[in-house]
Amino acid sequence: MGAALRVIPVIDVLNGVVVHAVRGERDRYRPVNSILCGSSNPLDVALTFRSLGFRELYVADLDAIMGGHPSPSLPEQLARTGLATMVDAGITNLADARALLATGTSRVVIGTETLTEPNFLKEAVDSFGGERIRLSLDMRNRRLLTRSSKLEELEPASAAGLFRNMGVTSFIALDLARVGSLQGPDTHLLETLVRTIPGEILVGGGIRNSDDLRELQSLGVQGALIATSLHSGAITIQQLAESNFIPRERN
């Protein structure tokens, strides 16, 4: 068994509500239907996760990622829940990153999907410290998603090595083709990433059940980003607590 793995719930926010993300087909996303929470309001969903014992939250501001402007109101509200929030809001400059951190957000997630200039990562790490920046390797079927001509031909592991040399120490491996699919994570790719990245790796996309979580843990992955399997009940809070993927005591 590998080092401890923690489960981190995900909320994808589009048009102000939490949506069920499936395979990155954003024009087809609909408000989430959850056995855990009867609301699709982001604050309600976040507070539900907090009450169930989670300590962290991954937030994707899809409006900002798809070309809009990041709004401080949502991350500020979510940070006040007491959850340590990491937020992807399509950040591509230091001013927006600074504004996001000022809301109480714990980490700014910079995704390759919206990244236009790789050197921005070095600027962000130099300005805010590696502990405040997390790089998301956004992929579709093992191909890196990016707006940068410098990155588009790179394999995910090669891109990760480039960012590691810029001071990035925490990575997300996110396969949009698997998000919401319940088809399981791409363990072959993850084995490669774990071998080549000497930093923290969180994984998102396709996680189905507790067996998947245990396999990720055995690979050396530190965190699993999950939404669909939590909302559907495919993975229960009791299972997570029994496997020490979340704290046993709630508060």
Image (cartoon, helix red, strand yellow):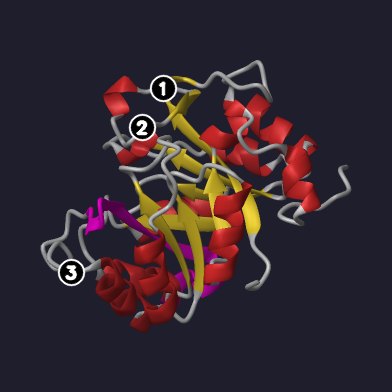
Separation of disc 3 and disc 1 at Cα? 33 Å
Using the image, determine if residue 228 lies above or below residue 95. Answer: above
Return the x and y of residue 134 as percentages of the image width and height.
Answer: 46, 63
The residue under the point 88% across, 42% down is 251
Q: How many marks?
A: 3
Q: Residues within 10 Å of mark 2 (few under 14, many from 20)?
A: some
Stretch of the chain drawn in magenta: 126-145
Separation of disc 2 and disc 3 at Cα? 27 Å
Using the image, determine if residue 171 lies above or below residue 36. Answer: below
Q: Which residue is mark 2?
A: 63
The residue under the point 25% across, 57% down is 142
Q: Which residue is mark 3?
A: 154
Using the image, determine if residue 173 lies above or below residue 154. Answer: above
Amino acid at dot 3: Leu
Amino acid at dot 1: Asn
Return the x and y of residue 82 as percentages of the image width and height.
Answer: 74, 45
Disc on the earlier residue, 3 or 1: 1
Q: Quadrant of the N terminus?
A: bottom right
The residue under the point 28% across, 36% down is 66
Would you say the residues marked 1 and 2 are in contact, meaning their CB atoms lie under 8 Å apart? yes
Q: In the rendered view, does 112 fall on the left or right side of 147?
A: right
